[in-house]
């Protein structure tokens, strides 16, 4: 090469280096405002928000995603992303990145040496690395219980606070398939968030909002609280990816880098800047103010972060040099502050964003019911986890430590929007289940020991003769402890723990093999019991599933169900003794079937009677002489044939999408529809488009009665016809719906080389009330459904048992319980010697004349046997004091009427320790005893 050419090449390299330095110098000069972000008045500001959406399990398991294995399914390695991002941020103080899923970050953080941790802390303190959302995962919003959403968010927030002393400001729910008002007011405003950001709303709604510049709104998700819990909500115009052509993942086959070396034949600065400006102006047409957000990332992006940042560095420099628009590195918090500073008025939104559809025949309402057995497992463990944490608190810190933490991670992971939703691959769902089972097994062992300690009459936790066991497979009549022969020397002792804050009476049903049994309460009184023969269907299910899942062959299934009513004090326990009957010492009934009259079987004692068809076994009538209810009911079982797509539209049903083949279901054996509050719906799927997620229950009313149904897990439900309730019990489809999971929803159980469709059994609770009187039952009995008794069994002589055990006791003062409209939803020991307490008002404003009022809880009486030394009220996730929470005030369009002042409880006096709660209010406290 000639010397002149060498010199020319050297000068070109120097020029290129100077341009790169100038880009960095411009970025560094941007540090004039908070956290290195400068906006320019009078120009369109494009906020580039670098992010990676990292599913906590989906196509691969959470472990496979973290370490980057099983890449034949999906090339994804979150560990690489975090390593790479930290390296890239450390190179340039202008760069920013947002971290979301703490399940991954906390695992990565624990592996880092102190030097790397120090670098990360510096990045967090400078605002380069911002935690948003901050939960363990990005939870689903349809199939999750609100307590589980709170728990998993609290877990992540506590870790961030502990390690970095930071409180996330932004909600980032970019991928869940529809959004709930509960997310806006409870998991947004009540956490102290300033904003909420997501992508998925109905395609018709999105187009109308884009046309009216209404994608960004002030969401008042609670009509009870109104503006006091509103939140700025930003709906992305497309999805959570960058605009077309501006994704810079290094292995993306469509990547179009910014080439600013003029010696290169593919130099494209002018073209790339023009593309950037065009895309920015197009998006600006959909929003108010001169600020727009570009979500610079996608699923499992930034595995080589420098590819993204190098190109964004160049874009920011050259776009700003061009001058038509202004580009900057940003975060959701910076973006929200800029929107708030504009001081304009925003549209108001109140309702949910359910159901969600992304095209004409693609209603994502199938996942409300997908994988119902997994949904039930999560729900069962949710209630169990609540009770176990109470027992852990009651037994104290000194004995067993924090044995419930083994369920923290798996329960939090299970709330992910591809976990409890039922939209992960089968092997991933199996992995979720395995994690839950292992965690629950450890907690069960801890509870068994804790109960031994708790019941000890001398207050010690010394080893005891009896060993408790529990029966997590009672649903298929498998309980070795109760199936053992009850001998003359030892009784079957059943300890019943009640996690509710009020006394309750509920029925216990256990499998037994002896028809000559008598049940006695803790005071020795014989109580009524009943034997019901175990039906053949249940026996067969037990045989198959115990062998398939436990590898145990049970040749002798139990003969009977033994039922009796247990009354247990609030947040306390009672003991029951089951022994062999001597004939005269029994109040026992054996269920019998009498010949039906008029083809009807009448069931029920006293004032309540239910009539069933003797031919079909289905409910036909409910009569209650006390409440004055007499209602004919038609109960039927139907199934929808799945649409597999047609010539016009290939969309079929799958794990996400529900698209029935027509509107009329097929019979198995012999509420407002087609409406959205703030936009006009064009009906394309009259069935799927009217399905809604149900977690507690659903009711239908006419001018006279309310028919209520409570459910035992998350389901999809609707009222397709007036006076009718439709609840989907199970889903099995033979093809994928092309929404990403890439396999059909065909759950099976396999045994001895043969596989059959998974059997799903559940319990639905039905009640009829006169119009306006059903809310009390739904709210209070709904708590019993969510928080059932925790049962523990042992075999011991009754007299010996009573000599060294406290058979019955409540944590609360004698004769005190919580009012019917209040529940304890969290009582948990934390690792900093504090105790987390949450109290929830169960009723909405105006829902019930008697119970939609201020409720009072006397904490001294709740913890009658302990002394509260300190009390601090916090936000919902307990990562900041309530008194220190700051909220942004937003102007809204059409706000010409005064907002009603919500009914809320006042401050807690440190001496009286009485907590007031208004309708729907949740109050969170950190206590020291």
Image: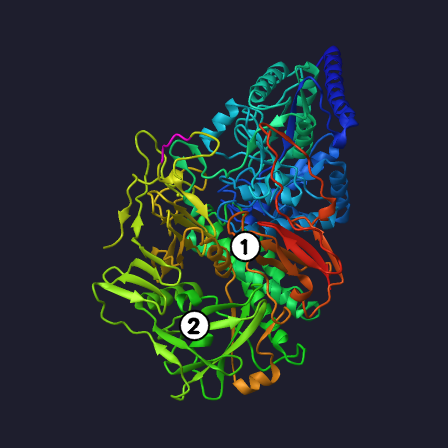
Residue 330 in view here: no
Residue at disc 1, secondary structure: loop
- Which corner quadrant holds the C terminus? bottom right
For marks 1 and 2, the one nearer the N-term is 2
- Residue 643 point in image, percent of width and height: 32, 39
- Residue 776 point in image, percent of width and height: 49, 56
**Residue sitting nearer the eye, 161 or 647:** 161
- Give me the residue at 51% from left, 22% from top: 211
Residue at disc 2, secondary structure: strand
Residue 57 in view here: yes
**Residue sitting nearer the eye, 400 or 800:** 800
Count all numbered tags in the image, as a single digit.
Answer: 2
Is residue 413 one of those drawn in magenta? no
Outermost residue, left side: 598
Q: Is residue 177 left or right of residue 810?
A: left
Residue that numbered label 2 is attached to: 510
**Residue sitting nearer the eye, 829 or 128:** 829
- Give me the residue at 60% from left, 68% from top: 446
**Number of other residues with Cα within 10 Å of mark 1, as a class: few under 14, some 14 to 19, many 20 or more:** many
Of circles 1 and 2, the one toward us is 1
- Residue 428 point in image, percent of width and height: 49, 50
Q: Find the magenta span and give its range.
A: 681-685
Residue that numbered label 1 is attached to: 851
- Name the magenta segment's main secondary structure: loop
Outermost residue, top side: 4
**How far, Cα to Cα, is label 1 from label 2?**
35 Å
User: Would you place residue 431 above or below residue 555 in this image?
Assistant: above
User: Would you place residue 817 above or below residue 351 in this image?
Assistant: below
Is residue 684 one of those drawn in magenta? yes
- The mark found on residue 488 in the picture is none
Q: Quadrant of the rendered structure where residue 613 is?
A: bottom left
**Number of other residues with Cα within 10 Å of mark 2, as a class: few under 14, some 14 to 19, many 20 or more:** many
């Amino acid at each position: 090469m000639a010397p002149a050419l060498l010199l020319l090449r050297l000068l070109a390299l120097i020029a290129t280096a100077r341009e790169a330095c100038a880009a960095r110098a411009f970025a560094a000069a941007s540090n004039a405002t908070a956290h290195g972000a400068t906006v320019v008045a009078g120009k369109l500001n494009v906020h580039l928000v670098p992010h990676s959406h990292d599913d906590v399990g989906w196509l691969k398991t959470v472990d496979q995603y973290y370490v980057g294995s099983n890449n034949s399914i999906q090339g994804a390695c979150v560990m690489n992303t975090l390593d790479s991002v930290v390296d890239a941020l450390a190179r340039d103080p202008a760069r920013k990145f947002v971290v979301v899923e703490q399940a991954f970050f906390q695992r990565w953080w624990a592996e880092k040496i102190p030097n790397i941790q120090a670098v990360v802390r510096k990045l967090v303190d400078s605002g380069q690395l911002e935690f948003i959302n901050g939960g363990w995962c990005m939870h689903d919003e349809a199939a999750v219980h609100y307590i589980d959403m709170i728990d998993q968010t609290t877990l992540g927030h506590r870790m961030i606070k502990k390690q970095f002393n930071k409180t996330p400001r932004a909600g980032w729910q970019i991928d869940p398939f529809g959004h709930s008002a509960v997310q806006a007011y409870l998991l947004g405003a009540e956490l102290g968030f300033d904003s909420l950001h997501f992508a998925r709303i109905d395609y018709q709604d999105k187009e109308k909002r884009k046309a009216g510049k209404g994608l960004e709104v002030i969401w008042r998700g609670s009509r009870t609280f109104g503006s006091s819990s509103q939140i700025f909500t930003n709906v992305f115009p497309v999805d959570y990816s960058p605009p077309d052509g501006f994704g810079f993942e290094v292995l993306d086959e469509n990547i179009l880098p910014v080439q600013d070396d003029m010696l290169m034949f593919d130099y494209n600065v002018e073209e790339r800047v023009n593309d950037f400006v065009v895309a920015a102006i197009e998006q600006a047409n959909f929003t108010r103010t001169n600020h727009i957000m570009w979500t610079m990332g996608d699923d499992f992006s930034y595995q080589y972060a420098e590819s993204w940042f190098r190109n964004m560095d160049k874009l920011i420099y050259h776009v700003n040099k061009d001058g038509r628009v202004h580009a900057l590195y940003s975060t959701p918090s910076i973006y929200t502050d800029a929107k708030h500073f504009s001081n304009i008025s925003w549209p108001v939104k109140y309702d949910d964003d359910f159901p969600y559809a992304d095209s004409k025949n693609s209603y994502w309402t199938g996942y409300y019911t997908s994988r119902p057995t997994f949904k039930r497992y999560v729900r069962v463990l949710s209630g169990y986890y609540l009770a176990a944490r109470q027992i852990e608190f009651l037994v104290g810190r000194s004995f067993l430590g924090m044995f419930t933490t083994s369920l923290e991670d798996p329960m939090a992971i299970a709330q992910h929007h591809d976990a409890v939703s039922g939209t992960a691959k089968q092997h991933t769902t199996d992995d979720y289940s395995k994690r839950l089972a292992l965690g629950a097994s450890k907690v069960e062992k801890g509870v068994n020991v804790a109960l031994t300690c708790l019941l000890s009459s001398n207050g010690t936790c010394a080893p005891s003769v009896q060993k408790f066991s529990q029966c997590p497979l009672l649903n298929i009549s498998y309980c070795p402890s109760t199936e053992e022969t009850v001998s003359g020397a030892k009784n079957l002792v059943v300890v019943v723990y009640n996690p509710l804050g009020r006394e309750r009476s509920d029925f216990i049903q256990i499998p037994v093999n002896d028809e000559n049994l008598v049940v006695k309460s803790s005071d020795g009184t014989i109580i009524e019991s009943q034997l019901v023969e175990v039906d053949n269907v249940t026996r067969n299910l037990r045989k198959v599933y115990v062998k398939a899942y436990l590898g145990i062959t049970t040749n002798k299934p139990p003969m009977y169900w033994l039922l009796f009513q247990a009354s247990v004090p609030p947040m306390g326990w009672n003991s029951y003794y089951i022994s062999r009957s001597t004939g005269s010492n029994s109040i026992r009934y054996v269920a019998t079937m009498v010949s039906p009259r008029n083809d009807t079987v009448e069931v029920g004692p006293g004032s309540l009677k239910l009539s069933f068809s003797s031919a079909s076994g289905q409910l036909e009538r409910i009569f209650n002489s006390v409440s004055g209810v007499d209602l004919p009911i038609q109960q039927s079982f139907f199934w929808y044939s799945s649409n597999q797509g047609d010539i016009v539209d290939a969309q079929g049903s799958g794990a996400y999408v529900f698209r029935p083949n027509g509107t009329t279901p097929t019979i198995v054996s012999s509420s407002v529809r087609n409406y959205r509050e703030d936009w006009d719906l064009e009906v394309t799927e009259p069935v799927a488009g009217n399905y809604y997620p149900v977690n507690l229950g659903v009711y239908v009313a006419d001018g006279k009665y309310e028919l209520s149904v409570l459910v035992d897990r998350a389901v999809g439900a609707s009222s397709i016809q007036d006076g009718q309730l439709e609840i989907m019990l199970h889903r099995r489809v033979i093809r994928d719906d092309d929404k990403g999971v890439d396999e059909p929803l065909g759950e099976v159980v396999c045994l001895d080389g043969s596989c059959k469709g998974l059997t799903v059994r559940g319990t639905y609770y039905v009640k009829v009330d006169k119009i306006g009187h059903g809310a009390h039952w739904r709210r209070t009995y709904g708590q019993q459904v969510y928080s059932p008794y925790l049962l523990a069994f042992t075999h011991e002589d009754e007299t010996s048992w009573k000599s060294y055990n406290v058979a019955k006791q409540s944590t609360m003062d004698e004769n005190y319980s919580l009012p019917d409209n209040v529940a304890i939803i969290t009582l948990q020991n934390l690792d900093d010697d504090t105790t987390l307490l949450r109290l929830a008002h169960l009723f909405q404003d105006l829902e019930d004349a008697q119970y939609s009022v201020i409720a009072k809880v006397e904490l001294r009486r709740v913890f009658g046997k302990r002394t509260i030394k300190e009390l601090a009220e916090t936000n919902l996730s307990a990562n900041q004091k309530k008194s220190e929470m700051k909220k942004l005030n937003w102007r809204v369009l059409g706000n010409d009427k005064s907002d009603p002042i919500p009914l809320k409880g006042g401050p807690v006096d440190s001496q009286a320790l009485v907590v007031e709660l208004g309708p729907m209010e949740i109050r969170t406290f950190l206590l020291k005893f």
